[in-house]
Image (cartoon, rainbow, N blue to C red):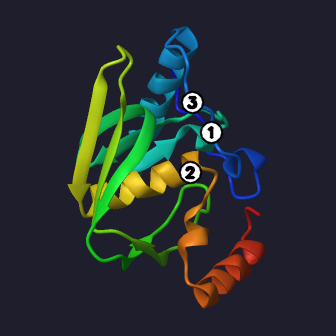
Amino acid sequence: MSVRPIRLFGDPVLRAPSAPIEEIDDGVRALVQDLLDTVELPGRAGVAAPQIGVGLRAFSYNIDGDIGYVINPVLVETRGEPQAVGEGCLSVPGLWHDAIRYPWAKVVGIDLDGREIVLEGEGLLAQALQHETDHLDGMLYLSRLPADTRREAMRQVRESDWF
C-alpha cells in the first residue's frame, strides 16, 4: 500500500476517541498495511490509525526490529511504579519530554484473521503500548506531562514552524 503522512497536533482526528473495528474487510486490510508501511521508517516505534487520519482502533509497532500491528487493542494491565521516561511523538515533531508511564504493560486485541493477539513487555515496548492506546483514546502524550512541563511543551508547540 503506502506510507501515509502523519497528522500533526491540532488535527481534530487526534483528539477524538477511535471507533472499534466491527468487520475485517478490504478497507481494514489496506489500513493495516498502511500502518505497517508507515511505521517501518527509521526512528518510529509506533503509529496509531488516527495519526494517519483514520479514526479506527488499530496501531502498528516497530520495537527493536519487531514490526507488527493490533486491531481493537485494549490496555488490560500495567505493572510497576509509574515513572518519568523520555518520550516524543510523530504528531508533535521536535519535542521530547519525560512522560509518566508504567514500566510494564499488556495489550490484547486481534489480527486480520480475528485471532487474539497479546502483546506484553517492559521498557520501550511497554511505553509504546501505552502511547499508542492513548492515541486511540484521543489523548496525546502531552497530557501525560507534569503541569509545568506541559506548559513549556505547549510554548514549544506554539513557537514551532509546523504549528
The reply to whether callout 2 and callout 3 are in contact (CB within 8 Å) is: no
Q: Mark 3 highlights which residue?
A: 20
Which quadrant of the figure has residue 116? top left
Q: Nearer the viewer, residue 53 or 133?
A: 133
Circle 3 SS class: loop
Is residue 33 visible to us here? Answer: yes
Q: In whole angstroms, how far apart are the C-alphas of marks 2 and 3?
A: 13 Å
At a point 36% along the width and 61% down the height, the residue shown is 127
Asked if the residue at tag 1 contacts the one at tag 3, i.e. Cβ–Cβ closer than 8 Å, the answer is yes
Residue 65, image x and y in percent?
24, 44
Identity of the residue drawn at 57% across and 30% down? 20
Quadrant containing the C terminus is: bottom right
Crowding at mark 2 (Cα within 10 Å: few <14, some 14-19, many 20+): many
Q: Would residue 54 appear left or right of 161 to someone viewing this image?
A: left
Mark 2 lies on residue = 135
Q: Nearer the viewer, residue 127 or 94?
A: 127
Quarter-wise, where is residue 93 in the image?
bottom right
Position of 123 relative to 46 (above/below): below
Residue placed under numbered mark 1 in the picture: 18
Foreground of the two, 42 or 85: 85
Estimate how packed mark 1 is, as few (under 14), some (14 to 19) or many (20 or more) residues with alpha carbons within 10 Å: many
Q: Assign a secondary structure to mark 2.
A: helix
Which sits in the foreground, 22 or 112?
Answer: 22
Residue 15 placement (x, y as % from top left): 70, 52
Q: Are the residues tagged 1 and 2 within 8 Å (C-beta)?
A: yes
Q: What residue type is labelled 1?
A: Ser
Q: Which residue is drawn at 65% across and 86% down?
A: 152
Cα separation, mark 1 vs mark 2, equals: 8 Å
Q: Distance between the residues labelled 3 and 1?
A: 7 Å
Q: Which amino acid does label 3 sit on?
A: Pro
* Category of crowding for the residue at label 3, using alpha-carbon neighbours closer than 10 angstroms: few (below 14), some (14–19), many (at least 20): some
Marks 2 and 3, the one that precedes in the sequence: 3
